[in-house]
């Protein structure tokens, strides 16, 4: 049962992800969370390093799409700055969110990875849709009060995984 909560890979941040290795594993599509994965919570200002990372990733041949539970207008504003397509509000962890993202990418589940900072949202939903997952650590400490509670449970679950 905990298999849905087991990320395939874990990195400190998106900048640490081994994009070359991912490519060799046959991954060409990336679905990616926004808040606390690419920008601080509720921000619509990706920093220079993040903009460069997105550009580099696209230049490597990856197709990328934002999958955010944030309200549509902020998510779309941020997506425009990143020059990325976006599904928002995506209603993760519902399977439909990932299916919509795959449609936009034009990719199959098995050639796509979901990158996010939340186990119960980003990882669980992607697993259900058959998409591989990368869990990163949240960029900032600031987040929705309910999420802080979820973090305690996340830590317990992750501690039980090898
Ligand atoms: Mg997030």
Image: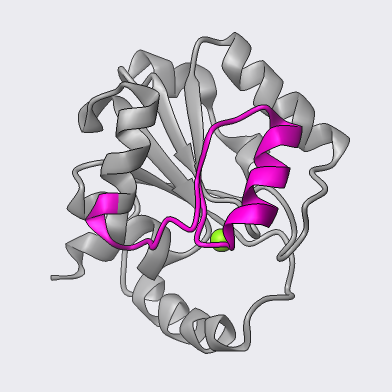
**How is the rendered protein coloured?**
one colour
Name the side, left or right, on which 109 lies relative to 52.
left
Residue 96 spot, x, y in % from top left:
25, 52
Residue 109 found in image quarter: top left
Residue 130 found in image quarter: top left
Which residue is at a point 48% across and 58% down the rendered structure image?
89
Residue 48, above or below 7: above
Q: Quadrant of ligand 1?
A: bottom right
Name the side, left or right, on which 94 lies relative to 63.
left
Residue 29 found in image quarter: top left
Provide the residue span drawn in magenta: 67-96
Q: Quadrant of the C terminus?
A: bottom left
Residue 92 visible in this rendered orientation of the protein: yes
Residue 112, above or below 116: above
Residue 6 visible in this rendered orientation of the protein: no
Report the residue that reaches farthest toward the right. Answer: 48
Name the side, left or right, on which 162 lies relative to 78.
left
Residue 82 spot, x, y in % from top left:
71, 32
Q: Considering depth in this image, is 3 or 60 the residue closer to the camera?
A: 60
Name the side, left or right, on which 159 lies relative to 40.
left
Residue 12 spot, x, y in % from top left:
61, 50
Residue 27 spot, x, y in % from top left:
35, 22
Q: Quadrant of the N terminus?
A: bottom left
Report the residue that reaches farthest toward the front. Answer: 73
Residue 17, above or below 159: above
Q: Would you say residue 46 sits in the magenta stretch?
A: no
Q: Considering depth in this image, is 17 or 122 the residue closer to the camera?
A: 122
Q: Considering depth in this image, is 16 or 116 the residue closer to the camera?
A: 116
Which residue is at a point 67% across and 47% down the rendered structure image?
38
Which residue is at a point 37% across and 61% down the rendered structure image?
92
Which residue is at a point 32% across and 21% down the rendered structure image?
106
């Amino acid at each position: 049962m905990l298999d849905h909560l087991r990320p395939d890979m874990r990195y400190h941040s998106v900048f640490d992800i081994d994009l070359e290795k991912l490519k060799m594993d046959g991954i060409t599509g990336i679905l990616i969370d926004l808040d606390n994965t690419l920008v601080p919570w509720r921000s619509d200002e990706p920093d220079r390093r993040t903009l460069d990372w997105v550009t580099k990733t696209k230049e490597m041949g990856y197709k990328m799409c934002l999958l955010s539970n944030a309200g549509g207008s902020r998510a779309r504003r941020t997506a425009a700055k990143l020059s990325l397509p976006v599904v928002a509000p995506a209603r993760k962890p519902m399977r439909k969110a990932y299916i919509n993202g795959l449609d936009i990418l034009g990719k199959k589940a098995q050639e796509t990875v979901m990158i996010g900072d939340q186990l119960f949202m980003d990882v669980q939903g992607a697993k259900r849709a058959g998409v591989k997952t990368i869990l990163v650590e949240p960029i900032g400490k600031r987040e929705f009060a309910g999420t802080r509670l979820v973090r305690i449970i996340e830590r317990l679950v992750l501690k039980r995984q090898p």
